[in-house]
Amino acid sequence: MFFLLNLVLCSVNYSHSQPHPWFYTPREEMLSYIGYRTGHIAYALLPLLILFSSRNNFLLWITNWSYSTYLLLHRWIARIFAIQAIVHSITLLQVYRDTGEYITDSKMPYWQWGIVATVLTCAMIAFSTLYFRRLSYEFFLILHILLAIFVLVGCWYHVILRWGFNFYHNWLYAACAVWFFDRLVRVFRVAKNGLHGAVVTEIGPDHVRVDIPGLRWASQPGYIAFAYFPGLNPLRPWENHPFSINATSLFRSYRPALAHGSPSIGASSNDAENEEKSAGNVVQATVVQDTSGVVGTSGVTLIIKKNTGLTRLLKSNSRLLTLLDGPYPQSHGSGLLKCDHVLLIGGGIGIMGLIAWTRAHPNVKLAWSVKSSAQALVKEMDVVLSDVLDKEIEVGARLNIDALLKNEAEAGYGKVGVVVCGPGGMCDDVRARVAGLGRAGKTTFELEVDAFSW
């Protein structure tokens, strides 16, 4: 729809004036109108383009759309922006060739800066494909920001050197204001959360657990935080990654034991105790210590898969300097919480995005698949998932997505919520199957997709 809107706005309401004051022929006049309009609309898209990529997008606060949705819109607006820039360049290039001004104007700085902005815009689109994002996310992010800066600089000099301070530059002021606001709020969030010494515990060869004490964040579905580990790579301390967040207390087991005014056998003085008086007896909950050895009820826990970038440097550490930017709502699950039943589908480390959902709805089923090499991760999740009565865990095998969703459709529920968190391929399969079942059956589905790939 947005693409069609741009197409319409670039195609209607052109008024011809012949003889033209700049001595354009009718063809040259029409091409120039198209060129200037597409250029102007491209500039008008810049603030929106940057806003939709921002973590601190004010539209996130007033709408029910997820951050992933805005990133999807950001990518589409970027493509439309690139098309507008290309059409602007081609049409005016032809006009300047026809009028004989190309030889002189093509040597002017404003023209050259316009070429820089257009070429780098196309480069950004090419290097933002899923292939490059998966190849090295850190490289993609740094390159993306650098190219964006040069595109803005190119756009600035393109209009200032040609038209001066004559309105066009106001779009660039707005774009920079959006960018600076987002960065400033990030700094405030990190400063508010403070510096933390995280405890890092290795879970098998491919995963680590990061316990960050001192933060009292509620475990709510769909929330993420961006973690900085400046000590891992001092040359690039700004690197950060998004992770699903869960309260550390969820990773501890509480064993109730009856006692008469005295501590249960085996409880240490450091154990957290919760006493409930009932009929003269005291029920004491003894904490079974987790693998990290962190004691206390506050804190958040991340489970991270080691990849080729910064996360590959994570290893056991008793006090790793950690900064957190967040929490941010990745999704809004108000519709899912109104469903009769919720099916949670996870792949690999995607289980971290589903933990809060297991406690947010009284009627859930969990289906989770992991590789054979992730046995240690499955064991680490034993305590967290112990309260989930209906669960299916596949180790070294894929989930039967068709069977899972078909069973939900045939179970007789009026409305079923489906949350999928995992690799892009799994999310695509679930999305396609839910769409098919929703059209064919009587069951209404509410789908929430949280793919690994942004």
Image (cartoon, grey):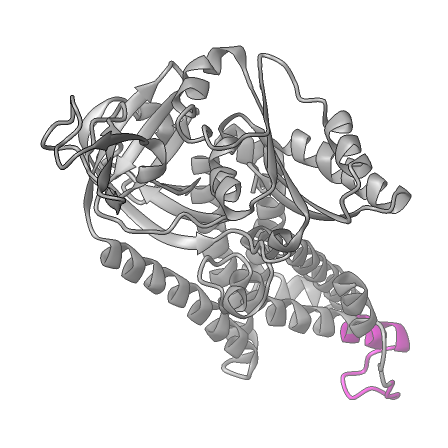
Query: Can residue 130 be seen by looking at this rendering?
Result: yes
- Give the quarter of the figure containing the N terminus: bottom right
Q: Of 193 and 76, which appears nearest the observer?
A: 193
Relative to 395, is 93 above or below? below
Q: Of 203 and 417, which appears nearest the observer?
A: 417
Classify residue 331 as left or right of residue 254.
right
- Specify start and end residues of the magenta stretch as a single range: 16-33
- Give the quarter of the figure containing the C terminus: top right
Q: Position of residue 12 (x, y in %)?
A: 85, 77
Q: Residue at the location (63% across, 14% down)?
A: 397
Q: Residue at the location (31% across, 48% down)?
A: 324
Residue at the outermost left position: 269
Q: Residue at the location (81% across, 64% down)?
A: 4
Relative to 390, is 42 above or below? below
Classify residue 57 as left or right of residue 22.
left
Q: Quadrant of residue 46?
A: bottom right
Q: Position of residue 65 (x, y in %)?
A: 60, 60
Q: Of 322 and 332, which appears nearest the observer?
A: 332
Relative to 190, is 248 above or below? above
Classify residue 140 as left or right of residue 89.
left
Q: Position of residue 162 (x, y in %)?
A: 56, 75
Q: Residue at the location (77% across, 40% down)?
A: 434
Say if the magenta span includes residue 63: no
Query: Can residue 158 be seen by looking at this rendering?
Result: no
